[in-house]
Image: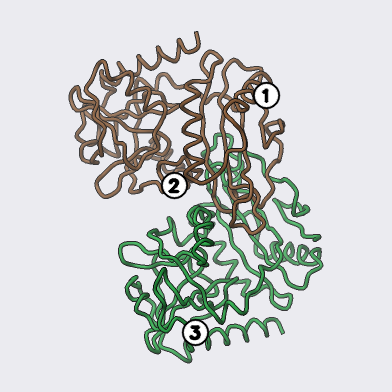
Chain colours: A green, B brown
Amino acid sequence: MPFHQYFNGEILPIDSPIFKTNDLGLLRGFGLFDYFRTYNGVPFRWNDYWQRFENSARLLKLTLPVTQQITEKVLADLHAMSGEQEVAFRFVLTGGYAPDSVHVVQPNFLIRTEPLPQDNPAGRLKGIKVLPYDYVRDLPEVKTTNYVHMVLMADELRRQQAADLLFHKDGEISELTRSNIFIFHGDKLITSDRNILKGITRKVVMELAKPHFEVEIRPVLYKEVILADEVFTTSTTKWVMPVVQIGDLPVGSGEAGKRTLLLQQLFEKLVTDWGK
Amino acid sequence: MPFHQYFNGEILPIDSPIFKTNDLGLLRGFGLFDYFRTYNGVPFRWNDYWQRFENSARLLKLTLPVTQQITEKVLADLHAMSGEQEVAFRFVLTGGYAPDSVHVVQPNFLIRTEPLPQDNPAGRLKGIKVLPYDYVRDLPEVKTTNYVHMVLMADELRRQQAADLLFHKDGEISELTRSNIFIFHGDKLITSDRNILKGITRKVVMELAKPHFEVEIRPVLYKEVILADEVFTTSTTKWVMPVVQIGDLPVGSGEAGKRTLLLQQLFEKLVTDWGK
């Protein structure tokens, strides 16, 4: 696997030890990231992902050490070196090395080339189970590196044969650990815009849905999710994934809904044709 | 500065790049730490710090890769190599390298040797200003690496000539970013035990206070702090530090209180004699 990574201007093998131990990402959890992939060798919705990355950096008051144009060249190099048709890229921007372990001096910028996550087309038809979890992400509009609860609950999810956590707080839902959530009440498609990281797949799915459904963007009650006809979640790796069980409760009939499957097909068509 | 660090069994120069980039501490903020120092060359309250470190690890479900006894030998080696009479040690335990960026396989354990933070005896007599901040730490009883708000607010603190943030939520205070808080109402010393990281200096100060004051341990309202006669904060680096201003409001007379200064003197005597 000749995958490589970019770090502050250098290209290095993916397994190289790179970070010194006074990095604020490591010592203080002060870091953000982004993650996207190629289809047919072309980065999907690259401008959207870059803008979100810029936005996260701005909100954490970190100066990006590179332009979008320079980054594009780096991505092309990393992609070529990988020898793979399709790759995923993970950007990580931390507060950098801090002599006093508090103040940002110069951010560290990393781009990792990663193999695509294992695809699971059968799971997309069958749907997933999620566990309700009383939590709301801190600084939700920033794609920070803080996923402590996800890692902490990973074994429990396995034990309960669940794929993810559904965050709710004070009766309102926000998102899953790494994906957005949509519900169908009849032909009305509803998704929250509060306390969430605004996913690029979420945005694409809303574009795809508009000709077919009424789309409502507003806070969503936990109760509404329980009573929904269909529920699904969207992310770069999950695409359009039906949610068929929440804790012990089946969603609707307990099977992937037809409206969800329509959006899933539209999304699959889009990425199948991407860059062609 | 011949300071060194220990990483998973090896001793390396303090500036070595060590961490590979798929570490869960770096990618997912899944890490915890602890921090303590020597007086007269002897680690202060080492058993207490070790127990707290063990407790943090247990709560994040991370297995410690070393025993307390082995760690003691490492500390002695690092200390000797430093050539310094006094040093500080920073332990960092992360979720380790994760092929899938989610599941813990084997934690990474780092011990950094650090120079003592600059001492500020004049500041301890004059006291500090803090800014109220609407926040409560996630998983407060774990010394996680999540200090995003502290780093984010570092420049604003400088601008307002404040030394730290005072966390409050729903009318109740918890702690400062890296230290505990005590208030005096008359001769009654009050401190919270809820939503806090239980500091070792906090514990020592309660021991020192008992012969002199009535000590009350219970949730503390933000309002009570504003109306207190004296306020101070405790930590490994701050010792017993008077808080003389909260936002725009002076505490009591606006000067370090006499009860606080008594506790400060008792603490200073303890550490001056430590290990002798």
What number is the disc on residue B153? none
With respect to residue A126, does B4 lie above or below?
above
Secondary structure at numbered mark 2: helix
**Marks 1 and 2, the one that precedes in the sequence:** 1
The amino acid type of the residue labelled 1 equals Met
Instruction: Examine the rendering and report whether any part of residue A58 can be seen.
Output: no
Secondary structure at numbered mark 1: loop
With respect to residue A219, does B43 lie above or below?
above
Q: Quadrant of the C terminus of chain A?
A: bottom right
The residues tagged by marks 1 and 3 sit, at their Cα atoms, a distance apart of 61 Å
The residues tagged by marks 2 and 3 sit, at their Cα atoms, a distance apart of 39 Å
Residue at label 3? A260
Find residue B101 and report its horizontal and vertical position in percent: 62, 57
What number is the disc on residue B1? 1
Is A53 left or right of B204, judged from the image as shown? right
Residue at label 2? B149
The residue at 41%/77% (across/down) is A250
Q: Nearer the viewer, mark 1 or mark 3?
A: 3
The amino acid type of the residue labelled 2 equals His
The residue at 41%/78% (across/down) is A251
A165 or A247, which lies in front?
A247
Q: Quadrant of the N terminus of chain A?
A: bottom right
Q: Nearer the viewer, mark 2 or mark 3?
A: 3
Outermost residue, bottom side: A212
With respect to residue B50, does A228 lie above or below?
below
**Cβ–Cβ below 8 Å for labels 1 and 3?**
no
- Give me the chain letter of mark 1: B
